[in-house]
């Protein structure tokens, strides 16, 4: 058995809400997570056809890349397909949760999956979106609980340093305390001084995840009143960004790279903005899923030979061409890559947590465009 809240808590450890761009309506859109779930479906878009599929398959929770309610609705009556869809979701008690720009920004998320699929070795994000101060938690626990505490703090996201995780420092010593009359001590008795062999555990973490780190600490700490310190560090802040920039292992001719993009994302065609017809070799690649045209200057700044992004506006294309950047527009729908990737990831969590829940990928094609 698993509750929706527990499932989403694990999801947000990977893809936290605070990483979304300002104003992006991520999180729970419809229904409640405070109930048992038996089937979860991953989808790119929430459209009437997707909801019909979810109803037929008896889905309890839909996780979508694109928020179903992107702009506020003024009334909820079934006079449009969109409103009728919302009412169907409520009627069948299907919760809908969206992870949008946070999935684009998170390390190991959608833009990294694009690069992995294309064979691009990432060395930087495209555009910085967040700068988060680093903090340190120092907590004292009895020796026999130290391993449990270190594991819990690492699982919460603390102790990540570069490509390393579950990093911590420990030191052993003596803890002293005297329980009062109203205390309910794990060790010792009221009004009797105690000396306990304890371990001091230190972990660092980005300030934005402090609540979940403290929750993990309190959950496993054996003491009624844990002793701990929170320290703001002067270390460089941790930064996050949208999009990715990296290099192909081997340079490709532009036409070869276009064919590679089409084959990778199963496309019959792409739109091309060719700024310099004499420049035919591609090695440094910038990519941003969705509509990333506003970041094209960052692609130029990072010396990209080509920039992949969707939904480039006509007049912006003129500016891009004048600036000398080659752009391949594969459309917005290549973001469907998140569906199998997240389904695979969530099925791995299911095994780790021993959850009795079925996790499936939507089979509905939500691409509104066709080519002939």
Image (tube, grey):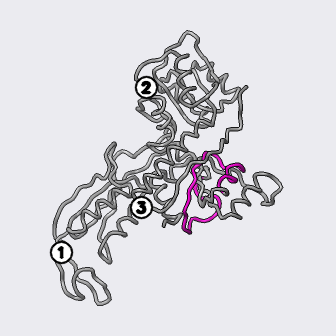
Which quarter of the picture shows residue 74? bottom right
Say which label, 3 or 2, has the lower sequence index: 2
Which residue is identified by label 3? 354
| Residue displayed at 29% across by 75% down | 223
Point out residue 315 in the picture as x, y percentages from the top left corner.
Answer: 70, 26
| Residue displayed at 30% across by 59% down | 151
Q: Nearer the viewer, residue 317 or 287?
A: 287
The local secondary structure at tag 1 comes to strand
Residue 351 painted magenta: no
In this rendering, the answer to whether 166 lies above or below 148 is above
Q: CA distance from mark 1 to mark 3?
A: 36 Å
Residue 47 painted magenta: yes
Which residue is identified by label 1? 196
In this rendering, the answer to whether 266 lies above or below 151 is above
Point out residue 255 in the picture as x, y percentages from the top left corner.
Answer: 55, 16
| Residue displayed at 45% across by 55% down | 13
**Foreground label between 1 and 3:** 3
Residue found farthest to the top: 278
Say which label, 1 or 3, has the lower sequence index: 1
Say which label, 2 or 1, has the lower sequence index: 1
- Dot 2 surroundings within 10 Å: few (below 14), some, or many (20 or more)? some
Q: Which residues are magenta?
A: 26-54
Point out residue 364 in the picture as x, y percentages from the top left corner.
Answer: 65, 45
In this rendering, the answer to whether 219 lies above or below 292 is below
Q: CA distance from mark 3 to mark 2?
A: 39 Å
Indicate which disc residue 101 carries.
none
The local secondary structure at tag 2 comes to strand
Residue found farthest to the right: 79
Q: Are marks 2 and 1 in contact (CB under 8 Å)?
A: no
Which residue is identified by label 2? 247
């Amino acid at each position: 058995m698993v509750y929706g809240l527990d499932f989403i808590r694990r999801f947000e450890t990977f893809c936290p809400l605070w990483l979304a761009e300002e104003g992006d309506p991520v999180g729970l859109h419809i229904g409640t997570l405070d109930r048992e779930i038996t089937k979860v479906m991953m989808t790119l878009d929430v459209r009437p056809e997707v909801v019909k599929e979810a109803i037929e398959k008896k889905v309890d929770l839909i996780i979508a890349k694109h928020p179903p309610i992107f702009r506020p609705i003024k009334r909820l009556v079934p006079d449009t397909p969109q409103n009728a869809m919302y009412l169907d979701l409520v009627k069948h008690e299907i919760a809908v949760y969206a992870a949008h720009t946070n999935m684009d920004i998170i390390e190991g998320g959608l833009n990294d999956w694009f690069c992995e699929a294309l064979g691009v070795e990432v060395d930087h994000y495209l555009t910085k979106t967040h700068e988060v101060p680093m903090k340190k938690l120092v907590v004292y626990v009895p020796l026999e609980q130290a391993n449990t505490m270190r594991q819990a703090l690492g699982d919460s996201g603390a102790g990540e340093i570069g490509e390393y995780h579950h990093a911590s420092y420990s030191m052993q010593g003596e803890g002293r305390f005297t329980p009062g009359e109203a205390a309910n001590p794990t060790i010792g008795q009221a009004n009797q001084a105690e000396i306990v062999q304890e371990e001091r555990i230190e972990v660092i973490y980005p300030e934005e995840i402090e609540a979940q780190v403290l929750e993990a600490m309190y959950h496993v700490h054996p003491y009624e009143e844990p002793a701990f310190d929170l320290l703001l560090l002067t270390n460089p802040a941790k930064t996050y960004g949208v999009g990715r920039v990296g290099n192909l292992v081997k340079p490709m001719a532009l036409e070869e790279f276009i064919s590679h993009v089409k084959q990778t994302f199963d496309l019959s065609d792409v739109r091309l903005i060719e700024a310099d017809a004499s420049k035919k070799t591609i090695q440094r690649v910038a990519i941003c899923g969705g509509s990333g045209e506003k970041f094209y200057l960052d692609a130029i700044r990072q010396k990209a030979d080509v920039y992949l992004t969707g939904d480039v506006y006509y007049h912006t294309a003129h500016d891009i061409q004048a600036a000398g950047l080659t752009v391949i527009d594969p459309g917005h729908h290549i973001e469907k890559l998140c569906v199998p990737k997240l389904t695979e990831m969530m099925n791995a969590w299911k095994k780790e947590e021993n959850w009795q829940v079925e996790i499936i990928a939507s089979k509905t094609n939500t691409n509104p465009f066709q080519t002939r």
